[in-house]
Amino acid sequence: MKELAMILKKEFWHILRDRVSLFLMLSMPIVLVLLFGFTISSEIRNAKIAILDHSMDSQSKNLIEKISASGYFQVVSYPDNETEIDRDFKSKGGKLALIIPANFEESLAKEQIATLQIINDVSDLNVASILNNYIRSVIYDFTSDYNDLATDPLLFDISVKMEYNQEMNSVYMFVPGIITLIMIIVTALMSSITLSREMETGTMNMLLITPVKKVYVVIGKLIPYMFLSFICTIIILVLSVLVFHMPIRGNLLTLFVLCVIFMLTSASFGLMISALVKTQLDAMMMTMMGLFLPTVLLSGFLFPLDNMPYFFQLLANVFPAKWFIIAIKDVMIKGSGLHEIWLYMLILFGMAVFLITISLSRIDKRRKK
């Protein structure tokens, strides 16, 4: 028993000395409970909707007021035609559009029937399905209120147009997310583990005292994993096109440039993590908790950001996956060009430059200790 007590004392002392690993292990249940508790929800609030009102009468205004008051929708634009609806989907993040026909009030009064058209952005199939049910529910409430005052029952003929994904294929939603996860795993995780191993064994210090600039040393470590990540991305794209018949509507060069910038950003996160921790195990745990989990939960890949608490919506802006998934969906599914996604690319590149600068400074400080 004495020998067992000595071994236990040694192991507990070893755990307590490794404060980074201890902190990561104890914080993991807190992070998981908070992230899953606040992000996994089937309810969507304040979804962005565009309303094309050809009638502009009192009943159409009543319907619009009911939509705004429902809490499910936030009216972000009143386009003049369907071309502007497509523009709002791309530039304002609209998820749904409602077209109210001309002479709406007159049709209700004389014919007791009116035709409404719903245009769904089906680039995210789950969100589109939920919002379609929401808007139908609001229209049904409007119908019930109108029927309480009218002598004849009112009927609506609702037509639905599926935009960007007419076949309602779920692969349109998963392919951009899979590309993002592969890049995070191959680029960020592998680079953080490799650089942490170099620092843990001391070989990084040997490389840094050579006549080669330290930025070249670091970039030379990152580029091979970026290349592997790029090859994996091409494989995913080829499979999605050949097997699942997913179209790539945007320019291929724009798509590849976007992917390279995101790889650089992911690699810079891996570099930052390796500069903060001392062991490979810590690097792996921090990458999984600090980058992989937020990529899954806070990027809009699986769960809509709009239904999360405002704090988590703000927190999502810190992680590059959110900006990349928005941009790659716009290019692949909506056919957006460089002039429509340049801001996302600039944000990702700015993150990369900032993180690489901070990481190199941190590596210098560790080397001088």
Image (cartoon, rainbow, N blue to C red):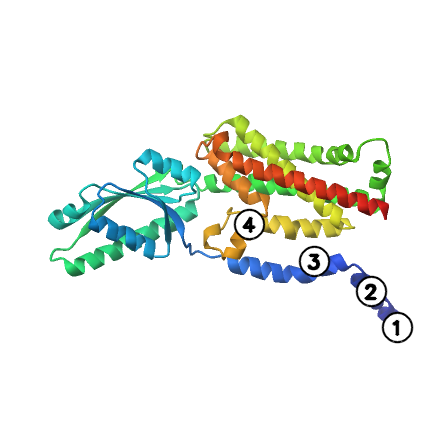
Q: Residues within 10 Å of mark 2 (few under 14, many from 20)?
A: few
Look at label 2 and name its amino acid: Trp
Q: Image check: 367 left or right of 345? A: right
Q: Can you identify the residue that label 4 sits on?
A: 316
The image quarter containing residue 121 is: top left
Q: Quadrant of the N terminus?
A: bottom right
Q: Residues within 10 Å of mark 4 (few under 14, many from 20)?
A: many
Q: Which mark is residue 13?
A: 2
Give the mark nearer the N terminus: 3 vs 4. Answer: 3
Q: Image check: 220 left or right of 254? A: right
* Separation of residues labelled 1 and 4 (CA atoms): 51 Å
Q: Which mark is residue 24?
A: 3
Secondary structure category for the residue under label 1? helix
Q: Residues within 10 Å of mark 1 (few under 14, many from 20)?
A: few
* Separation of residues labelled 2 and 3 (CA atoms): 17 Å
Residue 279's x, y, as percent? 78, 50
